[in-house]
């Protein structure tokens, strides 16, 4: 399934505009290898032209750390700044091999935290919320035993957040928060749902807001169980 959305295809995906917006998206691809687009809503124009074509983020900066663009509508409500900093830090370290094993002392120093307790507390939340997997292992090259960290499938994280009530069936943060999700966040979320659920999306789309959570949990549970390695 689609674990992350490549931002370079964002303008193409934006063609799936919600008709309720009474809006139109115009996408142009010219010979200069530059994609531009504009979003016209009630006479308001937003230019999608690149600000400086000669100063674009390039492939030369690899390896990259990927964070799903469609998480933008809830991530900053589900995690507090320290937890988010730790998640981004671990994402950076796991970007090349899929796992990392920094010591808690190294984490505290790299993030500029005042105590190891802060690291332990933030790590516990990331694990509880399904943002990381943690296991104690022998690190042969270091001749030591350490915690090893892995980022799980995005679907695993979403399932965990749904199960513990941190997001609802519309992928909004809960409880008691009316999230005015940006148009971009909403559209990115819909792109992922349509691609991830495929034929199952029709059932999800037809469900009431309250039922969407159950439909999504059922789908993700089945999807993840089908990936289990024998």
Image (cartoon, rainbow, N blue to C red):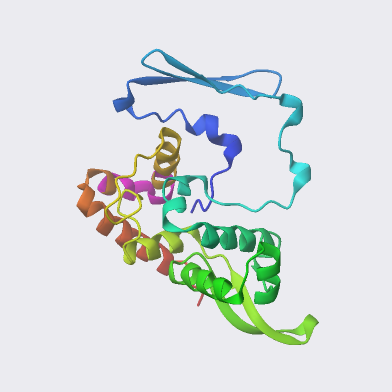
Q: How many marks?
A: 0
In the picture shown, does residue 50 fall above or below 13? above
- Magenta residues (range): 194-203
Q: Quadrant of residue 158?
A: bottom left
Instruction: Say which of 164 and 34 sits in front.
Output: 164
Q: Residue at x 44, y 71 (%)?
A: 128
Q: Is the stretch drawn in magenta largely helix, strand or loop? A: helix
**Residue 129 visible in the snapshot:** yes
Residue 55 is left or right of residue 24, and the answer is: right
Q: Residue at x 44, y 64 (%)?
A: 156
**Where in the figure is residue 36, as x and y percent of width and height?**
59, 22
Instruction: Say which of 142 and 84 sits in front.
Output: 84
Residue 59 is left or right of residue 135, and the answer is: right
**Where in the figure is residue 123, as x and y percent of width and height?**
53, 71
Q: Quadrant of residue 88?
A: bottom right
Residue reaching furthest to the top? 43
In the picture shown, does residue 90 fall above or below 184? below
Q: Is residue 15 magenta?
A: no
**Residue 103 visible in the snapshot:** no
**Where in the figure is residue 15, as x and y percent of width and height?**
45, 27
**Where in the figure is residue 212, as x and y percent of width and height?**
26, 52
Instruction: Say which of 193 and 223 sits in front.
Output: 193
Q: Quadrant of residue 114?
A: bottom right
Q: Residue at x 71, y 60 (%)?
A: 96
Residue 181 is left or right of residue 146, and the answer is: left
């Amino acid at each position: 399934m689609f674990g992350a959305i490549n931002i370079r295809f964002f303008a193409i995906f934006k063609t799936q505009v919600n008709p309720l917006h009474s809006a139109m998206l115009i996408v142009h691809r010219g010979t200069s290898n530059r994609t531009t687009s504009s979003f016209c809503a009630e006479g308001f124009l937003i230019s999608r032209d690149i600000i400086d074509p000669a100063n674009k983020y390039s492939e030369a900066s690899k390896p990259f750390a990927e964070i799903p663009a469609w998480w933008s509508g809830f991530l900053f409500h589900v995690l507090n700044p320290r937890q988010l900093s730790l998640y981004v830090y671990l994402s950076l370290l796991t970007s090349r091999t899929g796992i990392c094993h920094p010591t808690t002392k190294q984490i505290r120093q790299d993030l500029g935290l005042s105590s190891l307790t802060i690291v332990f507390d933030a790590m516990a939340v990331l694990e509880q919320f399904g943002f990381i997997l943690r296991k104690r292992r022998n690190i042969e090259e270091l001749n030591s035993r350490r915690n090893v960290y892995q980022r799980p499938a995005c679907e695993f994280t979403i399932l965990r957040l749904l199960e513990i009530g941190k997001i609802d069936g519309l992928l909004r943060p809960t409880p008691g928060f009316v999230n005015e999700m940006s148009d971009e966040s909403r559209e990115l979320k819909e792109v992922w749902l349509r691609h991830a659920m495929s034929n199952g999306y029709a059932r999800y789309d037809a469900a009431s807001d309250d039922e969407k959570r159950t439909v999504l949990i059922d789908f993700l549970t089945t999807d993840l169980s089908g990936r289990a390695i024998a």
